């Protein structure tokens, strides 16, 4: 069936897509040496480590954001994305590459566990929840190219 004729993904399908995209991203990160991970310029001025720290920040923020989305009928809200990105990277800049990866994995595990504890009925029809999951899938897939760029250094 052509993609434009496919029904939209269910929240459960989006969760599966997010989990798969995360795992592919993590697997690529785990191939990087500390030197490759710290080389700047793979995503603008960021290093692969900064990309991971950025995603860690969003995983941490996701728990709070999803709770807000699920406790209301809002589909989105304004976030100062640049400030969150800056804080996410700066607050983790003193971590080593291995420490950043451990924090990244731990924040994802907390995020994933919180999602698995939610009753399906709570998020089945919440458009804001679905939009957030799509955004996280996009982030893992988008930043995979930056990790691959670091692999070639």
Image (cartoon, rainbow, N blue to C red):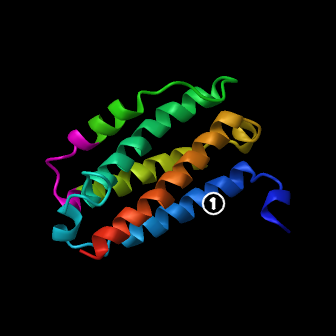
Percent of width and height locating residue 119: 69, 42
Residue 147 appears left or right of 128: left
Percent of width and height locating residue 105: 37, 57
Q: Is residue 29 visible?
A: no
How crowded is the residue under tag 1: few (<14 C-alpha within 10 Å), some, or many (20+)? Answer: some
Asked if 79 appears above or below 3 in the picture, the reply is above
Q: Residue at x 29, y 61 (%)?
A: 42
Q: Residue at x 63, y 25 (%)?
A: 71
Q: Confirm whether the magenta stretch covers residue 49.
A: no
Percent of width and height locating residue 57: 36, 42
Q: Can you say which quadrant of the picture contains the N terminus?
A: bottom right
Q: Can you say which quadrant of the picture contains the C terminus?
A: bottom left
Residue 81's quadrant in the figure?
top left
Q: What residue would you read off at disc 1?
A: 16
Magenta residues span 89-99
Q: Residue at x 33, y 69 (%)?
A: 149
Residue 126 appears left or right of 32: right
């Amino acid at each position: 069936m052509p993609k434009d004729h496919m029904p939209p993904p269910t929240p459960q399908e989006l969760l599966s897509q997010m989990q798969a995209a995360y795992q592919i991203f993590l697997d690529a990160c785990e191939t990087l040496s500390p030197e490759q991970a710290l080389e700047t310029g793979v995503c603008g001025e960021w290093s692969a480590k900064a990309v991971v720290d950025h995603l860690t920040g969003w995983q941490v923020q996701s728990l709070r954001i999803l709770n807000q989305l699920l406790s209301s009928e809002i589909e989105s809200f304004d976030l100062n994305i640049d400030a969150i990105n800056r804080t996410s990277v700066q607050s983790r800049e003193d971590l080593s590459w291995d420490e950043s990866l451990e924090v990244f994995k731990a924040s994802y595990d907390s995020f994933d566990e919180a999602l698995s504890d939610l009753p399906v009925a709570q998020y089945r029809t919440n458009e804001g929840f679905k939009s957030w999951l799509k955004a996280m899938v996009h982030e893992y897939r988008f930043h995979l190219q930056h990790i691959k760029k670091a692999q070639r250094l």
